[in-house]
Image (cartoon, helix red, strand yellow):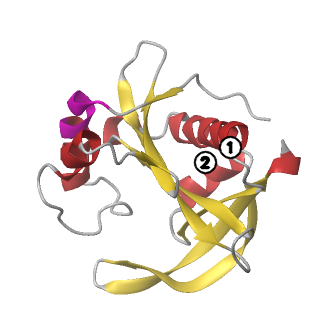
C-alpha cells in the first residue's frame, strides 16, 4: 500500500465542533457544501452523545501533534436482503487548509481499519462525484477499489450529479 502521513482518529469534542462547522460554511472546491445547517448542530450531536451510534458515527481526524484536520463519518447501508446484508458508507470532510497532503487517504484507510476491527462488516463503501478526481485518487491510495458509476446520486448546487462507487472488503486487507 501507498505510504501515507500519520493520522489518528478520536472522539469529537465540543472544541472540534466550532472549527468543523466553520469549515463547512465556505467549502473550498464545492463538493462538500450542500446547504446551510442550523448553527450548533454538531455541538448538539456531541452533547446528546449521538456521534457514535450502532447505525453510524463520526470521529475527529488529527495529525501526530493532535491538530484537528477534519472528520470522518460512516453510516449503515443495506446492500442486500436484511438483516445480514449491510455495509458501511464512508465520508470525509477535511478542513480546507489540510487538503491535498494525503491526510484524506490516510484518514479513510484508518477509518476502514477501525471499522473492520470494531464491527462485523465485510464491506465499506465510499462514493464521490465523477468530477471529484482528487477524492477518487484519495480513495484509491487508501486501498479502495473503483466498482462503477452510478447516475444522479448527489444533489448539489441545484442539480443532480453522477458518482463513482468505491469499496474495500475485509478480505482486501
Which residue ends up furthest to the right in the rendered image? 171
Q: Are marks 1 and 2 in contact (CB under 8 Å)?
A: yes
- Residue 5: % across, % down: 59, 25
The answer to whether residue 26 is visible is no
The local secondary structure at tag 1 comes to loop
**Residue 144 % position (x, y):** 72, 53
Residue found 67% across the figure and 62% down from its top: 87
The answer to whether 94 appears left or right of 113 in the picture is left
Q: Is residue 131 above or below residue 55?
A: below
55 left or right, relative to 120: left
* Residue 58 figure quarter: top left
User: Observer-nearest residue: 102 or 144?
Assistant: 144
From the viewer's perspective, is 139 left or right of 53? right
Q: Which mark is residue 49?
A: none
Q: Which mark is residue 138?
A: 2
Is residue 24 located in the magenta-colored stretch of the structure?
A: no
Q: Residue furthest top?
A: 65
Quarter of the rendering occupied by the C terminus: top right
On the image, the x and y values in percent for residue 40 come to 14, 49
Residue at the disc numbered 1: 142
| Image point (68%, 45%), residue name | 119
If the image is split into quadrants, where does the N terminus sit?
top right
- Magenta residues, start to end: 13-18
* 15 in the magenta segment: yes
What element does badge 2 sit on? helix
Which residue is located at x 54 percent, y 54 percent? 134
Q: Residue at x 18, y 38 (%)?
A: 18
Q: Considering the whole magenta stretch, tell me its main secondary structure.
A: helix
Near-viewer residue (78 or 141): 78
Location of residue 33 in the rendering, given as x and y in whole percent from the top left corner: 29, 63
Amino acid at each position: 500500500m501507498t505510504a501515507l502521513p500519520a493520522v489518528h482518529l478520536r472522539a469529537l469534542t465540543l472544541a472540534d465542533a466550532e472549527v468543523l462547522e466553520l469549515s463547512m460554511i465556505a467549502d473550498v472546491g464545492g463538493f462538500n457544501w450542500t446547504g446551510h445547517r442550523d448553527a450548533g448542530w454538531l455541538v448538539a450531536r456531541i452533547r446528546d452523545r449521538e456521534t457514535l451510534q450502532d447505525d453510524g458515527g463520526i470521529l475527529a481526524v488529527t495529525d501526530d501533534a493532535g491538530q484537528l484536520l477534519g472528520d470522518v463519518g460512516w453510516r449503515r447501508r443495506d446492500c442486500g436482503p436484511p438483516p445480514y446484508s449491510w455495509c458501511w458508507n464512508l465520508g470525509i470532510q477535511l478542513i480546507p487548509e489540510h487538503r491535498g497532503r494525503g491526510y484524506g487517504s490516510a484518514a479513510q484507510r484508518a477509518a476502514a481499519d477501525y471499522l473492520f476491527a470494531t464491527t462485523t462488516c465485510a464491506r465499506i463503501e465510499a462514493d464521490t462525484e465523477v468530477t471529484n478526481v482528487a477524492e477518487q485518487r484519495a480513495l484509491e491510495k487508501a486501498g479502495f477499489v473503483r466498482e462503477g458509476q452510478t447516475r444522479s446520486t448527489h444533489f448539489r448546487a441545484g442539480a443532480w450529479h453522477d458518482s463513482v462507487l468505491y469499496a474495500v472488503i475485509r478480505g482486501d486487507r
